[in-house]
Structures are given as C-alpha cells and as structure tokens.
Amino acid sequence: MRTTFISLIALLFCVVQSMAQDKISGRILDLSEKIPLKNASVMLLQAQDSILVGYTRADEKGVFSLNKPKSGDFLVVVSYPKYADFFKEIKETEPESDLGEVLLTSVAHLIEEVVVKRRAAITIKGDTTEYDASQFKMEKNAKVEDLLKVLPGITVDASGNITAQGKTVKKVLVDGEEFFGDDPTLATRNIRSDMVDKVQVYEKMSDQAERTGVDDGVREQTINLKLKEDAKNGIFGKALAGGGTDGYYMGQLMFNKFKGSQKISAYGLLGNNATTSMNWEDAQKYGGDSGSTVSDEGITFVESQVDPFSGQGVVGIPRAPTK
C-alpha cells in the first residue's frame, strides 16, 4: 500500500513538472530604475519560419506568462514603447522556461553611436498584426498575392483564397476601402508587391454594424493593403473578342484606373449574339451601379449601357439574328 502511494505521488509530481515546462514566464522591468513595464508586449515566434504562435501583455507588476508548444525551437520577443526590443531563444531541449527578470533598456540610455538600420518586420498594434512589406524580398513585378505567400501566418491557395492566422480572409481592402468590388483577387492579382508599404491583418466589424453603429458581434478576417504615397496610381483592365460562322461576333472591353482616392471604371459590350450585359462574375467584381456616385473620398464612375446585374435598361436595339 505504501509503495503504491509513493508511486502515485511521484507520478503526480512528474505530471505537474511536465505541465510547468509548457509555460514561458518572466517579469519585465526597466534596466536602470527596476520599475515594472506594464502592458509590455510579448510575442512567441517559431524559430524556423517566424510564425506567431503566442502573444500576451505584462500585468501591472510586469509579470507575463504564455503557453509554449511542446515541440520546436522558439524566439521570445519583448517590446515596449521607447525601449530597445529584447530577444531570447528557447530551445526544445531547454528545460527552463522561466526568463526571470527581463530588463529593457530605454532608448535614451543607448549608446549614441548605435544605429538601428533594420525596421521590425512584424508589429503588433492592439488587435492588428502589421507586416512591413519592405522587409520581405520579392521578385521584380511580383503581385500582392506573391507577397502574401511569404508573410508568416498567411497562406494563399491556387484559387487565390487567403487564410490569415488560421481564419479565412473575407475582404482585402486597399487603404481601408474596397478595390473595385468585394473580390479579394482583384486587388491581390492586379497590384504589384512593390507598391505596398504595409500589410495589416485584423478582424473587421460587419458592414451592417458599421452602417448602423450597433455592434452585432460579427467579425470578418480582413487584410488592408497600405500603399506607398507615390504608388497610388495604376491602370488595369480586360479585353475579349471573338467571331464565328454566319457573321456572328462579340467583343468586351473593361477599363479601370485609380489615382489617390479616385476610382474610375468603364466597360463596353459589342456583338450580335444577344449578349447585352456582363456576366455575374464580372458584375460582382466591377460593381453593379450605372451612372456615377460622389463621396467624400472621391468620385466613382461606372459608364455602361446596361445594368450589369439585371441586364435591363439596354439603350438601342441589340442585334440577335435568328434562323
């Protein structure tokens, strides 16, 4: 009986000890005055690919604790405004995960000759994860989709569907606004990566909640592309032409231009095969309002002979020969 009891105690001790190794903890203090640095941010990154696997903030006493995966090597990054960042490697074989006192040095006390030439590639701002696009090397003329594929925590499949931090991205905005419609690939496959300054990932309130001001609790994983000031200017479009027997023909032209906050979109259709409107996919991308609209940010023009959603309102008589 006594042997069984001792074995049980030993087993419980091993379990508790094993659980303790799944935590990383410490206390963040100012190096010179030893005062706690409340709300200092603590990030846990995978050493292999810098994917963010854990995040927390220090409490009023500067104490922090976060979960550590059981396998793999990791990098702890501690940051606080106007203080130099702290880095600590955590090996898979390292049994001790208590960092003790993490002492941060104020920028004011750094040696004047020391110059930080490299900006942080990833920054946490509240509930927003921000990537500095300049810190990720890309091929010449690469698209935004190619840039997203190399950002830690973001994946893009062959169809252009985006997953960020384990959640499906519903919207891709450009400077906080939809880019010629709500299809994410229209922005990711038509904007060059070298035009992007920052890539922001956050959970956006639903459109209904933003219109009414009443929070319905619905959140959409969103990516916002912040363009460089000298890159907010571009043109893209689509052209399609075809002909057949018995004199049948058709043609389609789409033109889109953006400059600053102004967006201009136009399309035209020509043919004698009874096609009088855009298909549903193009209508979703390029918008469904005819005429023009004016907003505080600029003017959006959609020149058309047809409402692209209904196919109604055709001006003139379409030629649709029959036999």
Image (cartoon, helix red, strand yellow):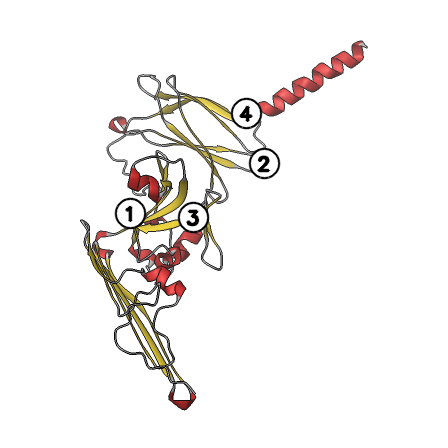
Q: Name the residue under label 1.
A: 176
Q: Do the residues labelled 3 and 1 touch (CB within 8 Å)?
A: no
**Nearest the eye: 63 or 114:** 63
Residue at numbered disc 2: 71
The mark lying in front, picked from 4 and 1, is 1
Query: For mark 1, does the 10 Å Cα neighbourhood hold few (<14), some (14 to 19), or many (20 or more) residues?
Result: few
Q: Quick check: can you spot residue 173?
A: yes
**Cα–Cα span, label 4 and label 1:** 44 Å
Can you identify the residue that label 3 sits on? Answer: 169
Element marked by disc 1: loop
Q: Where is residue 89 in the image (x, y as percent from the top left)?
A: 48, 34
Report the amino acid beneath label 4.
Glu
Amino acid type at mark 1: Gly
Callout 4 environment at 10 Å: few (<14), some (14 to 19), or many (20+)? some
Compared with residue 193, is residue 211 higher up or lower down, i.e. above or below? above
Q: Along the horizontal axis of the image, is 41 left or right of 167? A: left
In x, y percent, where is residue 306? 29, 68
**Mark 2 vs 3, N-terminal side:** 2
**Who comes first in sequence, dot 3 or dot 1?**
3
Real-space Cα separation, disc 3 to disc 1, in angstroms: 15 Å
In the image, taking residue 99 as reference, residue 236 lies left or right, namely left
Specify which label sits upstream in the sequence, 4 or 1.
4
Of 157 and 66, the residue lying toward us = 157
Front disc: 2 or 1: 1
| Badge 3 element | loop
Mark number displayed over residue 96: 4
How packed mark 3 is, by other alpha carbons closer than 10 Å (few <14, some 14-19, many 20 or more), is: many
Amino acid, disc 3: Val
Q: Earlier in the sequence, mark 4 or mark 3?
A: 4
Query: Spatial distance from mark 2 to mark 1, Cα to Cα?
Result: 38 Å
Pointer 2 or 4: first along the chain: 2
